[in-house]
Amino acid sequence: MPKVLISDKLSPRAVDIFTERGVDVDVKPGLSPDELAAIIGEYDGLAIRSATKVTRDILDAAPNLKVVGRAGIGVDNVDIPEATKRGVVVMNTPFGNAVTTAEHAITMILSLARQIPAANESTQAGKWEKSRFMGTEITGKRLGIIGCGNIGAIVADRAQGLKMRVMGYDPYLTPENATRLGIEKVELDELLAQADFITLHTPLTDGTRNIISADALNKTKKGVRIVNCARGGLVDEMALAAALGTGHVAGAALDVFENEPATDNILFGMDNVVATPHLGASTTEAQEKVALQVAEQMADFLVKGAVTNALNMASVSAEEAPILKPYMVLGRQLGSFLGQVESEGLQSVSIELDGKAAVLNPEPIVASTLAGLLGPVMESVNMVNAAAVASANGIAVSTVRHDRQCDYETLLRVTIKHASGSRTIAGTLVGGDKARIVEVQHIAVESDFPAHLLYLRNYDKPGFIGDLGTLCGKYGVNIATFHLGRRDVGGEAVALVEIDGELPDSMLGDLRALKQVVRVDALQFQQ
Ligand SMILES: NC(=O)C1=CN([C@@H]2O[C@H](COP(=O)(O)OP(=O)(O)OC[C@H]3O[C@@H](n4cnc5c(N)ncnc54)[C@H](O)[C@@H]3O)[C@@H](O)[C@H]2O)C=CC1
Ligand SMILES: O=C(O)C(=O)COP(=O)(O)O
């Protein structure tokens, strides 16, 4: 039974879902990095929020880890490139807390406009400072949204309800979507120059880090108010503190900080700052949704092979997973055949899909084929990282889905080009789910993918089968099945010989010495 660790505070619904779906689960929030590293080795899955940092060190200590599930949106606390290298799927729940976070941003805008937190504190202290807390109306004010994705779009909708004029900066926002969302699409400088309120809703990436820098703040309108419910690193905190100090920025509301937990920060204690402890996603409703969703996604992956909302792998739905599985196995075995025969100097691989295979989601089939192909040569290659490993090694990958008449209900052909030539193999599914070779080097020959298979290239000359049989007898190797194919009479031929057990090394030399034999490979296939 797969085993998952929940290392942050998740709704208990997650535990119920894991258990119902056949996954063992331990709940240990608040572990230090060392404590997590000490136990992560025993788990197949890790469910987190933003507190757990899934660093390279944690991944190094997690040889059995297959999936990291983020109950939430931002995954900047996960080293995704390192996870991908190790074949660990990283998934998030991209929608579950979006509404709640957008509501927090709107709350922050209103809190700033009317100085609610400071007014509350003063009033409860018995001061009644009515004239100190003069506010600003938001109706008709310009709201600049940086990042108009899920959350930004919801903020735009709610802000329009409050009669704000909304403009947005997002390089990936199409003019059509901007019109649909009622957002005036502008460049960053224009937004900075015109907005009365600026709210940030981008992920933290190299492209967005410090997007609100000292320079950007210099371009803003005097009296601007800034809201950040996205990620701490988006705003240069020193520059913001300086701009608040001079009064150029009238107020800032921050849910997220450069260093979290933020127990000490240059912005704390300033009059015009509202701060919350990364509460954007913290409502009962949102936490139920993300916990339930992450547990469903992780359990479906670990138990059924379904991939949903993965950031480093193509999606495979729970319905698709059982349909795709035999095709993925066929791809893996065909890839493995070629990878075992030709491991050096791979330049390109082409994967052709015919018949039923051509109408399926090709990405998982291609990923599985690449994993089979590269597995014999490179350590720790799997479906998650195979495409990245191929690309990192300069291997060009192409996929062709044929829409044509085909002799087989399904045909998958894998062709590799390498330093000294090319190789190709094709296979089908017998009875809908049993992988079978039907061609090697364009020579028709049929075989399953048994645990031990001898692949011989020979010349079609009398005596070959007798010599092979004699050698098998001499070494005590039992032949289970024997398949022959040839290009033409007396010409190039292929033999695929299933044997019971491993081929003795010394027999390989004797086989290669047979006069009709061009090459021999002893192949093994995962069953
Ligand atoms: N405070 C909290 O508790 C929460 C914070 N978040 C944060 O909010 C962020 C946004 O979440 P979603 O809207 O769901 O993500 P999303 O992926 O739907 O939207 C992000 C948008 O940012 C845009 N973007 C990317 N680079 C940009 C750039 N350089 N300039 C302007 N726009 C850029 C993208 O095109 C995209 O439209 C998350 O990445 C997460 O860090 C999310 C949930 C809760
Ligand atoms: O979903 C996100 O990106 C968040 O920032 C929410 O963080 P949390 O799950 O509350 O630690």
Image (cartoon, helix red, strand yellow):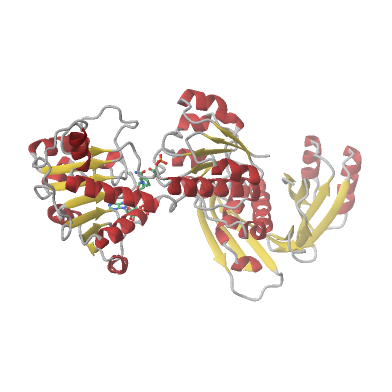
Residue found at x 64% / y 59%: 324
Q: Is residue 523 left or right of residue 39?
A: right
Q: Is residue 247 visible?
A: yes
Residue 358 occupies quadrant: bottom right
Query: Residue 402 location, x and y as percent?
Result: 59, 70
x then y, percent, for residue 105: 29, 49
**In the foreground, 339 or 382:** 382
Quadrant of the image containing the N terminus: top right
Provide residue 157's location: percent of width, then percent of height.
Answer: 30, 61
Residue under the image location 58 percent in, 30 percent down: 41
> Looking at the image, which is closer to me, 7 or 477?
7
Q: Is residue 394 visible?
A: no
Residue visible at 39% across and 52% down?
A: 98
In the picture provided, is 412 more to the left or to the right than 284? right
| Residue at the (10%, 47%) spot, across then down | 223
Relative side of 331 to 510, left or right = left
- Residue 252 point in image, percent of width and height: 20, 42
Which image quadrant is residue 204 in? Answer: top left
Q: Nearer the viewer, residue 246 or 91?
A: 246
